[in-house]
Structure formats: structure tokens, C-alpha cells
Image: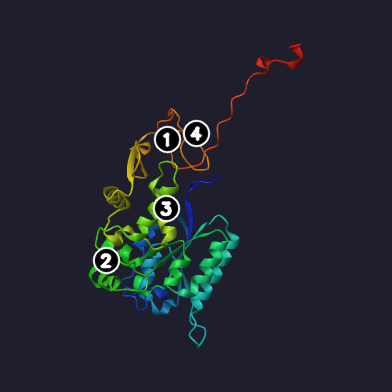
Amino acid sequence: MSITAPNERRIALFIDFENLVTNTGFTAANFDLQPSLDRLLVQGKIIFRRAYCDWSRFQEAKAHLHQLGVELVDVPPSTRAGKNAADMRLVIDALELCYAREHINTYVIASGDSDFVPLAAKLRENDRYVVGIGVKQATSPMFVKACDEFMYLDTASRDHGRDEGSRRPRAENSTSGAPSRGKKGEIPGVVRSVVGSLLARATGPINPSFLKEALVRKKPDFDERDYGFSSFSRLLEAMEKEGLLTRIQQGRQTYITAKEGALETKPVPESSSSGAEGTLADHSGEHAEPRPARVEPMPAPLRLDEEHIPDPDDEG
């Protein structure tokens, strides 16, 4: 019997270690993987952890990675041309795991190398969710777009205050993968666009998590903290103040709806019309809890009992 929650991700983590500590502001001695692991553990269970490189060059990092349960795969350089054998080993292991372990549904590739774009594409082709982790100023924009979601190491480490002063200026001056920032606390254009599109098609209140998922699909490296919001709830609060949406609190759950109209403040009935225009039917509201936008089947038409239908043969 499985002890994993149905919606919990089963995660495999592959680390191209040399890429993360070469010309990135990190070194083998100060590299800290724990903040990234903490963010991944929120999404699910990490059941595979492996890091690749020539470990004779990065002895200082071995003890830290061992403490985090990461298996270290030693891949000495094998060609004079300088092609990284660790990259090839990582790709082979990831594809082998993809075809041999169907229960692993999320693959995390810690690297900023565009050489992993084909790997990300093949994993997504096999219905795997791909997360990238990299250093902002050393990550290829092509690899960011190839992933379903992307997290920056320096953003995660900033919250833990490790080497904050030495890395933050480099990240803010980056142009390779960093989001373009306006004023702090200003709602970015991508958020306005996604919110408007999502609420325009909604037939009722929606869960904010749907909005966050839509934003990540649109921009894999989206992080509300890059725009001055400490949490996604703060971003929702700012959008409500600007009239982009309305928040509804029902018990412990918060829902969002379009600003205009009083219908969003009422409980949404379970049976809603699925007509061509996608409008809600005018029911009496038998259910108190608002539900996320979804298309419900039409209620079955009323039928008359056959005994009340006159028989034409009896009229003569």
C-alpha cells in the first residue's frame, strides 16, 4: 500500500555541480543546497538525489552534500576536447530512470547549461514535470524556458542570509535570466495579463493556486519576491487594491473572482449552467461553499409518469 499522498510529487534531483560553482559567485566551500531542498520538499518527496562532477576538484563540498543525503557520482574528465563527461552521465541516468521508474513524476535538473534543453524536452514529452535550478547570472534563458518551473539558487539563499552581501549585487545586475524589475511592490505585466485572461474565462470563484500555476506555466522562473512581495498572498492583496480581482474568504480557504458584479460574493451552487456563454444559472444557492470554476453537467430533465399521459386509443 502506498504511503504517498495522491497529489504529492515524487522527485528525482540531478545536480551538475561543476556548472553551479564555476563563474557563478559560489564556491565548493560556500555552496548551500539546503534552501533549494526546502523548497522542493514543499512540493513533494525527494526520493533520488545525485550530484555529478570530478570530485577531486571540489573536495570542500563533499561533506555538506553527504549530510544532505546526496549520492556523489565521480566522473573524471575523459576527453581532451573538454566535453563534460558528467553532463552525458547525468542525461543517461535521467532517461534511464524516466523509463524504469514510472512513479517518479518530477525531475529536477540543477544546472544552468543549455545542453540540458533536449533532456528537459524529452522528459516533458514523457509526461514528467521538469524543474530547473540554477544561478541567475549563469543560467541560459533557453534552459529556463525548457522547464515547467525554474528556481534560482541565489533567490533561495538570500532568504537564509548566507553570503548575502556578495551575491545579491551580482544577481540584480544580471541580464541572462533575471526578471525585469520595476518599482518594488509594483504588479508586473505578466501577472496582470494572466489574471485578466483567467478570470475572463472563469464561471465562478477560483482557487489562488490555479493562478500561481498559470503564472509559472507562463513564466517558469516567476517568483513574487523578485517584485517586492513577501508572499503570494501579499501579491493578491495588492491586486485587490488595484481592482484587478476580489478575494472571498470561506472558512479557511480564500477564493478569487473578477471585481465587477455582486454574484462573486454569493455561494456558487454546485449545479451551474454550461451554456455557450459560460454564465451561471439562476439557482437558489443550496450549497454554502464556493467552488473553483468548473463545468458541471446539466441537471436531468423532469419526466412525467406514464400513467398521467392520456392514451389516444381511449378517447374514442
Q: Nearer the viewer, residue 72 or 303?
A: 303
Residue 42 visible within the image: no
Q: Nearer the viewer, residue 191 or 174?
A: 191
Give x and y (percent) for residue 243.
Answer: 29, 48
Q: Position of residue 165 (x, y in %)?
A: 22, 70
Q: Residues within 10 Å of mark 1 (few under 14, many from 20)?
A: many
Q: Work out how far the residue at label 3 is from the one at label 4, CA to CA, in angstroms.
A: 24 Å
List the residue tagged with mark 3. 197
Q: Which mark is residue 162?
A: 2
User: Which residue matches tag 4?
Assistant: 271
Residue 171 in the figure: left or right of residue 129? left
Residue 195 x, y percent position in the rendering: 38, 52
Residue kind at label 1, given as amino acid type: Val
Decide which of tag 2 and tag 4 comes sooner along the chain.
2
Dot label at residue 268: 1
Q: How many residues crowd mark 4 within 10 Å: few (<14), some (14–19), many (20+)?
A: some
Q: Position of residue 102 (x, y in %)?
A: 58, 56
Q: CA distance from mark 2 to mark 1?
A: 47 Å
| Position of 31 relative to 313 (above/below) | below
Q: Secondary structure at mark 4?
A: loop
Q: Are marks 4 and 1 in contact (CB under 8 Å)?
A: no
- Earlier residue among tags 2 and 1: 2
Label 4 and label 1: CA atoms lie apart by: 9 Å
**Front residue of this view, candidates 215 and 105:** 215
Query: Mark 2 is on which residue type?
Result: Arg
> Residues under labels 2 and 4: Cα distance?
52 Å
The residue mark sitting in front, 2 or 3, is 3
Left or right of residue 180: residue 126: right
Q: Nearer the viewer, mark 3 or mark 4?
A: 3
Q: Amino acid at mark 4?
A: Ser
Upstream in sequence: badge 3 or badge 1: 3
- Give the Cα distance between marks 2 and 3: 39 Å
